[in-house]
Image: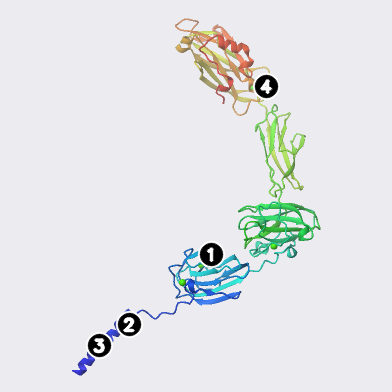
Amino acid sequence: MRSQKAFLLFVVLFFGVVVWMRVAPPVLAAAPSNDDIDNARFVSPLAYFDVADTSEATAAVGDPTDGPTNNSVWYTFTPDHRMPLHADTFGSNYDTFLAVYTGRPGSLNLVASNNDHDGPQSRVHFIGDAGIQYYFMISSSGGTGGQLHFLLYELPPPPNDNFANAAVIPKVPYPDTPLDGRSDAFASTVEPSEPTPDCSADKLKNSVWYAYTPSVNGSASFSLNYHPDTQVLGVYTGSSLDALTQVGCRMYWGVDSGLLTVQVQAGTTYYIQAANPFSYDLGEYFWLAVQNPPPPVVEFFYYPSDPSIYDDVNFYACCYDPAGLGIATWQWDFGDGATATATDYYVVHRYAANKDYTVTLTGTTVDGRKATNSQTVSVRTYDVGITKFSTPSSGRVGQTAKIVVSIANRLTPQTVRVELLASVPNGFRYVGVLSLYVPAQKNKTTDFNFSYSFTPQDAALGKVNFLANAYIENGRDALPGDNQAISLPVKVSGGAGGKGNVLNEADGAEMQEGFVLRGQLSEHPEMQELFSSATKKVFLPSIDSIPQH
Ligand SMILES: [Ca+2]
Ligand SMILES: [Ca+2]
Ligand SMILES: [Ca+2]
Ligand SMILES: [Ca+2]
């Protein structure tokens, strides 16, 4: 009996231990003492370096949510003077997030934060003010903590912070590689007697200096690259900070790597001041570049694009100087022996003969850089004209009129298109279009023959006028004033009769000649009178409103 009881007790205890082992939590490693902001570890003195195990650190309800809060731990530091600060987590073995705050626990203000700066590790730069308590939260961006390396130190000014220590630019182009020209200028300062360049939008907050002594006369183009925001470049001559003469200035707004070009003298030292007038962040990867100025970009166009010997050809230079100094003169060579030098971008030239001319424009910048551009300008003069416009003088409905438009061409052979229109109330309608080869002939013309059947509408109006337009198919008529003709009114009556169905000269029909319009109708009082008194119903549009092709 006793042995049975003892056995039962053994069984109960055995299974009790097994059950306890299965439900009890595993033994925990301790959370770090600075798990919570209220127990933030005090950092002192600088430079400060700490190694901590954050694997059991926890997210607190009050942790700020500017980034992940997993495995958060806290440090705090109060500078005794104003100082640029550097904090990083380099060397940690897990993916960190680093944020800096001012204020009190529960009402924190974010100063700076960073997730991945060097691989998954974090780094911030900020200006620490005297007497202000800063909190540093390091959390896990990957979900687990690990071995944290936390480093905080006062950032030293860059070596070329002061005018006296200006970084020497040995030769141009500079830098040979962007890395050479890089400068972490975050901790730079402004010296008391330092000048503010006159184009600066505000008083400088920081600056770094460079010195360049060219060995030959010429120009140098400076630019700022990878600057974080608004910055300014000033270029000076002079030997001391309080006796500098500004020779160049350029503001950089946002993303801008444009050139500031300065004319330089051999042997003179130029001091270049890179500064930020708005914030203390001159940039970590900021670098100054110096190059020989690129040539200007020179292009031109002209109008009309198909000039004739009757045209004043308008030439427009469309040039710019990427170095920023601007173009001082334009030299034109028109290719026919004529040249022009202009300080304006626009010139006019007229050619005397039909030929291909090579036109060359040379643009010269104020510092003597040049670029040229050439184009072939083809001068061709085309001119055909209507010399005769024959219509019958009268007709009846049902009869067909032969209408002849005679085209003269004394220059080069052309394919000519002639359109014939007939008057209707309020304008004209198309009757037909004819395209013919017209040889160049001194004393002969080419006839374009059209047929027109008189309509009851013509008879109702009592007459019809015809209009003819002549166009050169593959070119522009240099003298368009003789390319349009209008007929005298053709009397039209209804019913049968007359001399057969086809009305032309060979059949003995009475023919009449129209007028070739030269210029605006207002210059032809006889036509105005004709069309204002002869009928109130036929309306002759102004030449501008007649369809053109
Ligand atoms: Ca925590
Ligand atoms: Ca990270
Ligand atoms: Ca400085
Ligand atoms: Ca003409």
Q: Residue 150: percent from the left, percent from the top? A: 55, 73
The residue tagged 1 is 113
Q: Ligand 1 closer than 8 Å to the CB at disc 2?
A: no
The reply to whether residue 24 is in sight is: yes
Check if mark 3's residue and mark 1's residue have beta carbons within 8 Å. Answer: no
Residue 441 found in image quarter: top right
Q: Amino acid at mark 4?
A: Arg
Mark whose residue sits in front, 1 or 4 = 1
Mark whose residue sits in front, 2 or 1 = 1
Residue 106 versus residue 4: which sits nearer the camera? 106
Q: Earlier in the sequence, mark 4 or mark 3?
A: 3
Residue 139 versus residue 295: which sits nearer the camera? 139
Check if mark 2's residue and mark 4's residue have beta carbons within 8 Å. Answer: no
Check if mark 4's residue and mark 3's residue have beta carbons within 8 Å. Answer: no
The residue tagged 3 is 11
Asked if residue 285 lies left or right of residue 422, the reply is right
Quote the CA–CA distance across marks 3 and 1.
59 Å
Q: Earlier in the sequence, mark 2 or mark 3?
A: 3
Q: Residues within 10 Å of mark 3 (few under 14, many from 20)?
A: few
Q: Which mark is residue 21?
A: 2
Q: Earlier in the sequence, mark 1 or mark 4?
A: 1
Q: Amino acid at mark 1?
A: Ser
Q: Which mark is residue 121?
A: none
> Residue pushed farthest bottom?
2
Check if mark 1's residue and mark 4's residue have beta carbons within 8 Å. Answer: no
Mark whose residue sits in front, 4 or 3 = 3
